[in-house]
Amino acid sequence: NAGVTQTPKFQVLKTGQSMTLQCAQDMNHEYMSWYRQDPGMGLRLIHYSVGAGITDQGEVPNGYNVSRSTTEDFPLRLLSAAPSQTSVYFCASSAGGSYEKLFFGSGTQLSVL
Amino acid sequence: ILNVEQSPQSLHVQEGDSTNFTCSFPSSNFYALHWYRWETAKSPEALFVMTLNGDEKKKGRISATLNTKEGYSYLYIKGSQPEDSATYLCAFTNYGGSQGNLIFGKGTKLSVKP
């Protein structure tokens, strides 16, 4: 049982480059989200989706795009990477509703030079 | 801006000690409080989801209580073991937030020495 699969685990980008972080879940979860983790900060919500075709912004959405064409996949796109986007990124999913626990992917360590 | 505070920031205990830490959150429009355990080099894993004032949850040596009227939750670890070393995160959501959006605290980092 794969759960939430997140790739890549590590990535180094140059300023201005674009890339996509992949996230897939096999639990038929409606809710999916992306968080970033920075030193001294709690996990901060970037974007989220409550179902296929529906996305919305979280606390720190600038510089990121998402789409949700299927229930399983929720990629995060960095359009033009900046050093401020150096962070650890986590994808998470849940069955939906704030009383449902989140299942996290293994994380992506991203460095933007 | 909603804020979730966790204390202490870090904690060092000896194996066998019992310990507890606190999560404080806004008491208005409470909906749910989550606790996650996050080991180094792994991803966070859910411990508890609590929704009712007075809720108490238990999982092995770990338990949690919830007071929604005053806006706090305690996490207790009885007889700490080295494998309990991790960062413990709490996260809160209110009715006004969008479905499933949690506001995370910065965590309490627990180190258990053998």
Image (cartoon, rainbow, N blue to C red):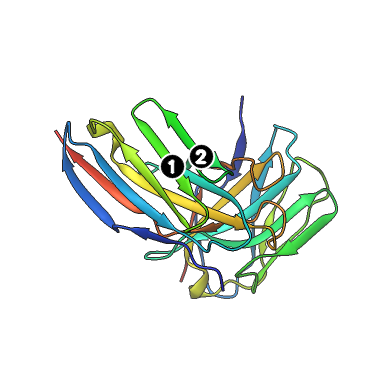
Q: Position of residue B112 (x, y in %)?
A: 20, 39
**Residue density around tag 1, few if under 14, some if 14–19, many if 20 or more, within 10 Å:** many
Residue at position x 23%, y 30% in the image: B79
Position of A68 relative to A105 (above/below): below
Is residue B32 visible to us here? Answer: yes
Residue B55: image tag: 2
Is residue A110 visible to us here? Answer: no
Residue at position x 59%, y 40% in the image: A101
Say what secondary structure mark 1 lies in: strand
Which of the 4 image quarters holds residue A45?
bottom right
Say which amino acid is labelled 2: Asp
Circles 2 and 1: CB atoms closer than 8 Å:
yes
- Residue identifier under label 1: B65
- Whole-number angstrom distance, CA of label 2 to CA of label 1: 6 Å
Task: Count the numbered circles shown.
Answer: 2
* Quadrant containing the N terminus of chain B in the rendered view: bottom right
